[in-house]
Image (spheres, rainbow, N blue to C red):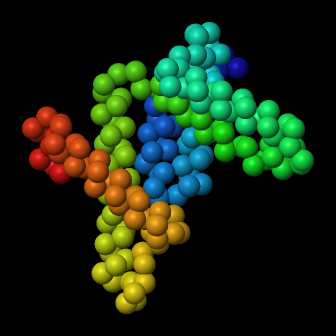
């Protein structure tokens, strides 16, 4: 028991790693990404319980909270509230905003997030090109890791947009990697 008292978890680091791994796996496996998002949520809750800090939220988050509140109110008065509340569980994803806002307070953290996201995008792109070149049949659309061709096309478009933005607006030593 004395060993447990000496261990003090680094909650912000857990949030940072959880969100970083969530972003890394968000374009590869939804299940693994959700596990790391749960790790980030645990770190975020632990951070706020341990430090007793006020939860910081950006200004655009208040309308999202109003939307969630009104949606839960509508679910309460629906014909079948049980199914409505079950369908409304996706609103838990709005917790990502304060989690990220807590975890990434420095520029170094944001740069790390960009790099992790680009690695995830690159893995998806390499898989798509490999599948197209070696495994697909004529006329077949690439489904990628997510299972639908439109999702894969959207991921490739997001990757191209982020890579172009980093190429155009980053410092010279980082931008030539793209």
Q: Quadrant of residue 4?
A: top right
Q: Is residue 174 above or below residue 106?
A: below
> Residue at left 18%, top 37%?
169
Expressed as whole percent of the image width and height from the top left, the position of residue 6 reads 58, 16
Expressed as whole percent of the image width and height from the top left, the position of residue 126 reads 32, 66
| Outermost bottom residue | 138
On screen, residue 74 versus residue 65, left or right, reads right
On screen, residue 129 versus residue 69, left or right, reads left
> Residue at left 51%, top 64%?
146
> Residue at left 56%, top 55%?
30
Q: Quadrant of residue 139?
A: bottom left
> Residue at left 67%, top 44%?
90
Q: Can residue 153 be seen in the rendering of this structure?
A: yes
Q: Quadrant of residue 8?
A: top right
Expressed as whole percent of the image width and height from the top left, the position of residue 62 reads 58, 23
On screen, residue 102 versus residue 173, left or right, reads right
């Amino acid at each position: 028991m004395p060993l447990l008292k000496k261990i003090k978890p680094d909650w912000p680091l857990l949030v940072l790693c959880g969100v970083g791994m969530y972003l890394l796996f968000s374009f590869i496996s939804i299940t693994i990404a959700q596990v790391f998002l749960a790790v980030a949520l645990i770190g975020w809750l632990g951070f706020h319980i341990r430090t007793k800090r006020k939860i910081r939220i950006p200004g655009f988050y208040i309308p999202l909270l109003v939307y969630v509140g009104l949606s839960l109110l509508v679910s309460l008065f629906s014909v079948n509230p049980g199914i409505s509340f079950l369908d409304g569980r996706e609103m838990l994803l709005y917790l990502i905003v304060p989690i990220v806002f807590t975890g990434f307070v420095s520029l170094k953290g944001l740069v790390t997030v960009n790099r992790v996201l680009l690695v995830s995008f690159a893995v998806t792109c390499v898989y798509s090109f490999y599948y197209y070149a070696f495994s697909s049949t004529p006329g077949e659309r690439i489904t990628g890791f997510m299972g639908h061709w439109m999702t894969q096309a959207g991921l490739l478009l997001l990757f191209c947009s982020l890579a172009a933005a980093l190429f155009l607006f980053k410092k010279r030593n980082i931008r030539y990697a793209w």
